[in-house]
Amino acid sequence: MKLGINSVLFGGHDMETAFRWTAACGYDGIELSAIDGMSEHLVLDRWKELVAPIRELSKKYNLPLLAMEQPSQDSAKMEAAFAAAVELGIPIINCGPGGKSGDEASLRQAIDSLGKLADRAGTFGLTLCVKAHVGAAIYNTPTSLAALNAIASKSFGLDMDPSHIYRANENPVEAIRAVVHRIRHVHIRDCKGRQQNPGTPEMQANGRGDIDLLGYIRVLHEHHYTGPVNLEVIGAKAYEVPRCVAIAAESRGHMQACLQACKAR
């Protein structure tokens, strides 16, 4: 498994700050945030001018580009994301499911849209991943399985986020076993309680909440998962750098301990 950070944790700062401190905390790579409003990192409207600086930062800090998060299913946004990913050598695009929970028509529409986007990702040699998300059409294990069963493309996979599954009133350790064969990316963070939001950035740090992340990582290891495990902490845009680094470092230590405990490292 490759441990990384989604640069959105440093969304209030420039890309070099994200790269510098991700490397300093000992991560294996980085996921670039292309999330409008949460960061000004991989801005897709001007991605061509960002390719060279990003490549330079990746080389300077010895941080491979593990993935990109671009939540929208808008076709123009996705085309830009796919093109940028190819130029940067990013293998995985993570997007949101859209729609609303408990609405069968919304679920069908989300699956249809994701299937078409996955086919398009395949023409670029990329993998499109989606995660269950609180309030969206795909929000728990049954709806995740519905999407996986409907979309057979090898260019489509699951981005598994234990915090969303936990907030869907499921046990992430049990839930992951049902979908582990189609997991291509992991967004990891902790969560205290089962409320709609994931809590403050500090409480999203691994080890601060209620989720059995050791058990979760153990299942990944038992099933020979070797892909990215990227920390995704939202809500820290107004934080000063030291607070972001504290969250990154604490979470990296917890992840490393989990990997060692299950003999994955």
Image: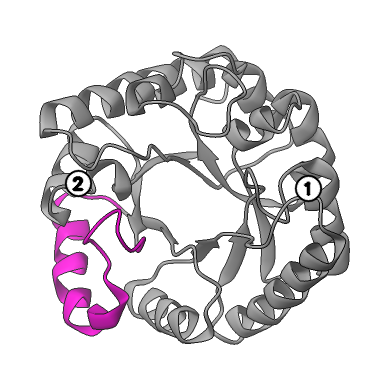
Question: Residue 105, position in %: x, y?
Answer: 84, 67
Q: What's under tag 2, amino acid-wise? A: Ala
Q: How many marks?
A: 2
In the image, 14: left or right of 157?
left
Q: What's under tag 1, amino acid-wise? A: His
User: Is the residue 180 above or below the residue 100 in the image?
Assistant: above
In the image, 249: left or right of 73?
left
Question: Residue 87, position in %: x, y?
Answer: 34, 80
183 or 81: nearer the eye?
81
Q: Which residue is mark 1?
A: 181
Where on the picture, by quarter, is residue 255? top left
Give the distance between the C-alpha atoms of the residues marked 2 and 1, in whole angstroms.
31 Å
Q: Which mark is residue 87?
A: none
Secondary element under disc 1, as helix, strand or loop, is helix
Does the rendering let one see residue 153? no
Query: Which span is picked out in magenta?
Result: 34-63
136 in the magenta segment: no
Query: Residue at coordinates 70% horizontally, 56% vertically from top-left?
Result: 100
In the image, 231: left or right of 21?
right
Query: Residue at coordinates 12% horizontally, 26% vertically from top-left?
Result: 242
Query: Residue at coordinates 17% horizontally, 55% vertically from top-left?
Result: 15
Query: Residue at coordinates 26% horizontally, 79% vertically from top-left?
Result: 47
Q: Which residue is mark 2?
A: 18
In the image, 59: left or right of 226?
left
Secondary element under disc 2, as helix, strand or loop, is helix
